[in-house]
Image (spheres, grey):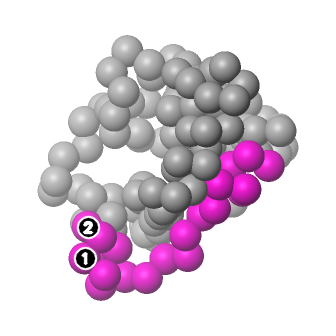
């Protein structure tokens, strides 16, 4: 589950079945390690890609040391869709914390207080191709 809050709030969820499908896809390609970071970036893209007025993206530090790789993947997804508004300086990583609105959005989805349409492995695979 991943969420954001920047005046508006939004979250995405992916099922364990779809995560397993993605993992198996990358395993078949012999790229088991790559799947985590590329899929994380793809999910962030699916979450923020349609937002028009973002000038700063703060991503919670989920994978310490892998931030440059995740940022590169995210920038590639944004550029491939024609979104040039966000550049490498507009994406930063830091601990978000439980007091943030983004955490509340995700927590509400987790508790079932807010419904979101799940993303499917196919959406991520289509993006990766």
Q: CA distance from mark 2 to mark 1?
A: 6 Å
Q: Which mark is residue 107?
A: 2
Horizontal relation, residue 125 to residue 90: left or right: right
User: Residue 99 at what x, y percent from top left?
Assistant: 15, 56
Which quadrant does the N terminus fall into? bottom left
Displayed quadrant of residue 80:
top right
User: Residue 88 at what x, y percent from top left?
Assistant: 59, 25
Residue at 41% in and 39% down: 59
Q: Which residues are magenta?
A: 107-126
The foreground one among 61 and 33 is 33
The residue pinned by badge 1 equals 111
Neighbours of disc 1 within 10 Å: few (<14), some (14-19), many (20+): few
Neighbours of disc 2 within 10 Å: few (<14), some (14-19), many (20+): some
Residue at 72% in and 25% down: 29
Which quadrant does the C terminus fall into? top right
Residue at 79% in and 49% down: 126
Q: Is label 2 in a helix, a strand or a loop?
A: helix
Q: Is residue 18 above or below residue 78?
A: below
Disc 2, disc 1: CB below 8 Å?
Answer: yes
Q: Is residue 68 above or below residue 62?
A: above
Q: Is label 1 in a helix, a strand or a loop?
A: loop
Residue at 19% in and 46% down: 97
Displayed quadrant of residue 30:
top right
């Amino acid at each position: 589950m991943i969420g954001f809050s920047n005046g508006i709030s939004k979250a995405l969820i992916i099922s364990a079945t779809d995560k397993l499908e993605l993992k198996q896809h990358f395993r078949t390609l012999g790229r088991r390690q790559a799947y985590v970071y590329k899929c994380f970036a793809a999910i962030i893209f699916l979450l923020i890609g349609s937002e028009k007025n973002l000038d700063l993206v703060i991503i919670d530090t989920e994978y310490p040391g892998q931030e440059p790789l995740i940022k590169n993947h995210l920038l590639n997804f944004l550029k491939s869709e024609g979104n040039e508004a966000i550049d490498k300086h507009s994406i930063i990583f830091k601990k978000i914390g439980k007091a943030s609105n983004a955490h509340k959005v995700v927590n509400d989805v987790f508790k079932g207080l807010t419904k979101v349409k799940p993303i499917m492995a196919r959406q991520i695979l289509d993006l990766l191709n």
